[in-house]
Image (cartoon, rainbow, N blue to C red):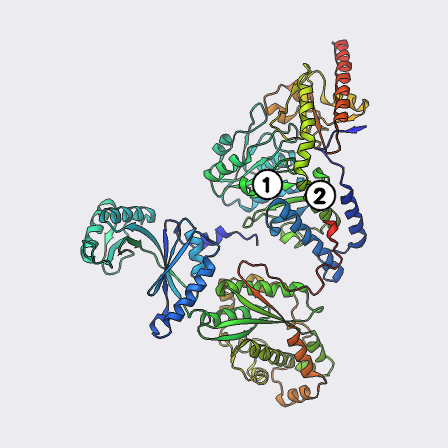
Amino acid sequence: MLYWDYAAASPPYEEVVQTMEQIMKLHYANPSSLHRPGAEADRLITRSREVCAAALGVQPQEILFTSGATESNNLAVKGAALQYRSRGRHIVTTEIEHPSVYESCLQLKSLGWEVTFVAPGSTGVVDPEQVAAAVRRDTVLVSVMHVNNETGAVQPLREIGSRIKAANRRTLFHVDGVQGYGKLNTQIKEWQADLYSLSPHKVRGPRGVGILYVKEGVTLFPLLTGGSQEQGVRAGTENVAAVVASAKAIRMSGERREAFNLQILPLRNRLLEFVSGIPEFTVNSSRDGAPHIVHFSYPAVNGEVMARKLEELGMTVSTRSACSSRLAEPSRVLLSMGRNSAEALGGVRISLGDSHTEADVAALEQALLTAVQALNIVERGTR
Amino acid sequence: MMRERETAAAASGRSSIDYADMLLLRFGEFTLKGKNRTRFEKTVLRHVKELVKPYPKAVLSKEFGRIYVTLNGEPARELAEALKNVFGIASISPVKVSRSEFEDILAVSRTFLEIIAPAKGTTFKVSARRVWKDFPHGSIEMNKLIATPLLQGYPGLLVDVKSPELELKLEIREGHTFIFCEQIAGVGGFPLGTNGKAMLLLSGGIDSPVAGWSSMRRGLEVECVHFYSYPYTSELARQKVVDLARVLSRYAGVIKLHLVPFTEVQTSFTGIGQDNLIITLMRRAMLRITTQLAEREGALAVVTGDSLGQVASQTLSSMNAIGRATVLPLLRPLVMMDKSEIVELSKTIGTYDLSILPYEDCCTLFVPKSPTTNPNLRIVEKIEATLPGYSARLDEAVAGTETLSITPYGDEKPSDVVPAQAGLQEEWF
């Protein structure tokens, strides 16, 4: 069985597992406790903050640990909207955001906020001009992802950031960086981002920890209360072992970014070329996209059918973002790119990781061919 | 740390001064005192330089009675907010600069008026001062030459030469003319350190940082002394004091903080069966240690946050019994102030939010149920004389004192009571 779902979850580094194990055994004390073991656990959190800050090029006090990128995104969007509601009740985001951003915006909408959803072009990239044009005097937040989790499309954050700030310098800019970190250069300052979410388990870290960069001077309305952890913005006992292991994974993946690209880009390009050569497929990714995602639609059948067929052939793939793959609805992201509903139902996502080799890709290609042939016969038979 | 800066500025209600090309800083009362002026002005300049450091494009120049900060694009409001806290600065004016040519002065004055946008009916006058005598128009002539076209362009303005609401000032100098109308009040006082040095007992409460600030405003350089009783008090309490000293350092550029380990001294008082005198004994021990530190540092007084009658150790009788433990003058800037006044000041200074953090400090520790408000000096002296190893313990505390230099933008930290690396393995990260 070959695993092609790194964008959903990646296998933790061996060192990450070891760190988790050792710290779980040694540092079970509560970091908020006043005794010495508590102070030691607290230091581990402090050191983790420093390591994450160094990897992202920001200050330690700007790093917040949460329970996952879903929480980070919820906190960024709703926390900013609630905190700054006196400035206005308008949010700008895109049609292609992860559900944790998208649905946070919908929630706010149901509470009376106005939300402008900017649609991408047919390549899945949003136009900075359009984002900036949506910014108004009462726009509190703009949220745009770095890399789309289905198609791998990379958003022009630098242009978006500078145009937003030119349109309204008080508008906050949130970047969901989950699929971009470790693959592309993370330039929080250059993007002029005020908030940036990150998920360690997408970069071979542990589950259960999310990171949120909150620029100094920006305040968020806490969504979780009941403790003064994380400077009072996020109550709850710190997950010490996973926080330390997350810092490690973030540091390692950041350091290995260039090596990762050198290894994965040729594989991605080969695979992209291969799926482009299959006439039954509509390719939804491009060479300009992130180095680890190849996404295509096979309109003849549901994406799920293709995924099951590939699994039978020993290949694990996803249909789309894991958070929505259990829905039998057409992909919102693909529809917003102008794909028809058959295409939007037939999406298949292949995501690569640093364990993959040329031989693996060759095997996947073979499996794809076999699957298409088999499904074509089935489809013709049913017609 | 994640406090929002913008709302604070908005709440202060001042209009934007982003138009300014330059800030004009005026010296305060000390300019009246002839012979020390150079020294005083230099001290202010040094202090201003320290605060301007984070704004590399700003350029300083000094003139008789004034300092100019040319902004070159640095934010006027932020700098003015920081600089108005410099002791010895009486006021700050945001200035627009034009070339010293009539047409240019008029054009910039017009723009200036548009930016300020005075409401209809605002009373107004122009006050020109011709410093550069080669300028073709005299001061009084200029008032008219500028005011007339301005009034034509702004028919809502009313002239009032006696007490106008808006006074547009022009200073015509060789090369440049300064145009301004606003005066932001500075904190005043004497430049830092021009009246000598004192030790400040910094507890972590509301009063002592205010006492420190008040002393600094009168030109005293202060070094902070803090007593901690680890493990009875937490490291958080020590960090809080470092943070308080950091707020004070905004007014001083740099401030020294002495952290005195007080556990041994303090616990030696608990077993003598005179619980109601513990506070008196503790305060006297603190003064003795501080006096030794003062000698070492060349300080000539001790500043405390005492306010008469506030707590048992601050009754007149307690002050008398405690104060006799030192030969140095005890300065108590807050002694006749009400608590509410002190709280207000601490909010203005920016120490209040830190002061109210609820960590146990050594003054709240081992506090007896009924501390005496009228300690008997003779008994206190007798206890001290008979307590075995008393003066050795004081010397040890002095020897174990750690000294930090705290700066406004630094991250100086006290060395950890629990070693930093305890239980932490670098390979985990």
Q: CA distance from mark 1 to mark 2?
A: 25 Å
In the rendered view, tell whether residue B55 sits above or below residue A128: below
Where residue A263 sits: x, y (%)? 70, 32
> Residue A330 lies in what quarter of the image?
top right
Where residue B344 sits: x, y (%)? 49, 65
Query: From the viewer's perspective, is A314 left or right of B279?
Result: right
Q: Are marks 1 and 2 on the same chain?
A: yes
Where residue A112 sits: x, y (%)? 55, 38
1 or 2: tag closer to the N-terminus: 1
Q: Nearer the viewer, residue A39 or A118?
A: A39
Label 1 belongs to which residue?
Answer: A77
> Residue B260 lies in what quarter of the image?
bottom right
Amino acid tagged 1? Val
Label 2 belongs to which residue?
Answer: A249
- Residue A46 seen in this snapshot: yes
Please report, as a chain letter, where disc 1 is located: A
The kind of secondary structure element at disc 1 is helix
Nearer to us: label 1 or label 2 = 2
In the rendered view, tell whether residue B315 sits above or below residue B349: below
Q: Residue at x 65, y 47 (%)?
A: A52
Where residue A351 sits: x, y (%)? 70, 29
Q: Nearer the viewer, residue B270 or A266?
A: A266
Quarter holding the N terminus of chain B? bottom right
